[in-house]
Image (spheres, grey):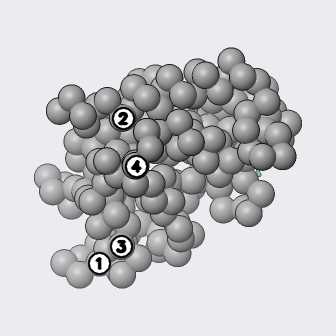
Amino acid sequence: MNVLVLVGSLRAASTNNLLARAAVRHLPAGTDVTFFEGLDALPFYSEELDAATPPAEVARLRQAVADTDAILIATPEYNGTMSAVLKNAIDWASRPRGAAAIAGKPAVVLAASGAGRNAVWAREDTIKALRVAGADVSEDSFGIANSWKAFDAEGTLVDADLDAELASLVNRMVRIPAAA
Ligand SMILES: Cc1cc2nc3c(=O)[nH]c(=O)nc-3n(C[C@H](O)[C@H](O)[C@H](O)COP(=O)(O)O)c2cc1C
């Protein structure tokens, strides 16, 4: 099974990157995990650019999405919603309409935020956008608050109950394609 990971934060010390890595540790051995690098290299979505031959970075994203069995997303909450680079990637992956790479792809949303509400708005908006884009997105998601103090030096969630919750969600995700 292949899992494509999209991390909506660009910074090297991203807690969403840590969260995604904590999640993929719970995937079964042998799962082929790819972190998509370069969300910031995608141009902003434009129907003019979205031509028969799209920009190379767009083609690379669409191919990665087309090739994967499932998508794992980790996004920060910026001003009450997902990050702009992530929304841009979803927009590109949602076209061409009727033949979109993301159509029918199982997807799970994680979010780490610096504030205290577990990034619930970012998760809700990401789930909504993925659903409208045609992905088979889980209504269950996983969010952590105060993410700057949520991980130990090894990148493990300090709260073992939260880590067990994360493992449960990730395991439900891997069953989606297996059952299909
Ligand atoms: C422009 C901006 C807007 C933010 N807005 C929110 C917000 O609405 N809700 C929230 O919980 N945190 C907000 N934060 C804090 C981020 O959630 C926090 O910086 C988070 O750790 C970023 O994720 P990262 O560690 O993966 O980079 C905001 C941060 C920035 C830079």
Q: Which residue is mark 1?
A: 54
Answer with mark 4 or mark 3, whichever residue precedes in sequence. Answer: 4
Ligand 1: image quarter: top right
So how many labels did they put on this image?
Answer: 4
Disc assigned to residue 30? 4
Q: How far apart, in angstroms, are the residues tagged by discs 4 and 2?
A: 12 Å
Q: Mark 3 and mark 4 in contact (Cβ < 8 Å)?
A: no
Q: Amino acid at mark 2?
A: Val
Q: Which residue is mark 3?
A: 60
Q: How far apart, in angstroms, are the residues tagged by discs 1 and 4?
A: 33 Å
Q: Is mark 1 within 8 Å of ligand 1?
A: no
Answer with mark 1 or mark 4, whichever residue precedes in sequence. Answer: 4
Q: Is mark 2 within 8 Å of ligand 1?
A: no
User: In this rendering, is residue 19 above or below 121?
Assistant: below
Answer with mark 4 or mark 2, whichever residue precedes in sequence. Answer: 4
Q: Amino acid at mark 1?
A: Pro
The residue mark sitting in front, 1 or 4, is 4
